[in-house]
Image (tube, rainbow, N blue to C red):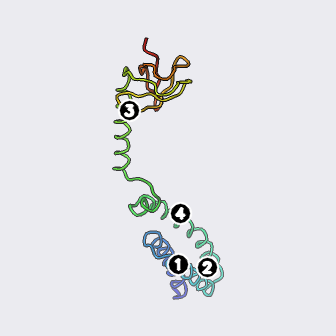
Amino acid sequence: MDPKLLWGLGLIGASLLLLILEVFIPSMGVLFVTAVVTALAGVVTLFTYDPVWGVSGLLAVLVLGPMVGFSALNIWKNTPIGRRMIGSKSEAEREEEKRAEVRERDQMLALVGAEGETLTDLRPVGVARFDGKRLDVTSELGLIVKGTRVRITAVEGTLIKVQEVS
């Protein structure tokens, strides 16, 4: 085989490797620029060997370059440094958030049946105090005036429904 052909193919292969490295090694674009220059040198070398090889090398660079880059980025976003840079949470953080949501939901459901006093008029939304805690509540049956005793009848997400205690 002719050395020009081997050099051209080798340079294109090296440029693809440099492109992958750019994604995983933060070089502020140095590896990317080197990959582009290496790919161009490989294509020029292939053109000096044979125009058919040159066109084939150019098409390979134009097709494989973006494919390799996007594939490497898809892998990168699942690495620890990728998650930190993107801002996505790790599995442990997501599990902790899920546990916190379950605890909060259980605390809210434990409020059903609690009695308290309205701090504002409920038209139908207002504020009431239950065991010293101020909560935004919604009246199920219309207007309830300030200072009225109410009981929590239901909790649906963050919506706390109350009725007047008779």
Callouts 4 and 1 close, C-beta under 8 Å: no
The residue where tag 2 is placed is 53
Q: Residues within 10 Å of mark 4 (few under 14, many from 20)?
A: some
- Mark 4 / mark 2, whichever is N-terminal: 2
Q: Report how far apart the C-alphas of labels 4 and 1 lie in the structure.
A: 15 Å
Element at label 2: helix
Q: Residue at x 43, y 69 (%)?
A: 24
Q: Report how far apart the C-alphas of labels 3 and 1 lie in the structure.
A: 62 Å
Kindly indicate the quadrant of the structure image that contains residue 143. top right
Q: Give the residue type at disc 3.
A: Lys
Callouts 2 and 3 close, C-beta under 8 Å: no
Q: Give the residue type at disc 1.
A: Ala
Q: Position of residue 31 (x, y in %)?
A: 49, 78
The residue where tag 4 is placed is 70
The residue where tag 1 is placed is 35
Instruction: Name the mark on residue 9.
Output: none
Q: Report how far apart the C-alphas of labels 1 and 2 lie in the structure.
A: 20 Å
Q: Mark 4 against mark 3, which lies toward the viewer?
A: 3
Q: Quadrant of the C terminus?
A: top left
Element at label 4: helix
Q: Nearer the viewer, residue 75 or 96?
A: 96
Q: Mark 3 against mark 1, which lies toward the viewer?
A: 3
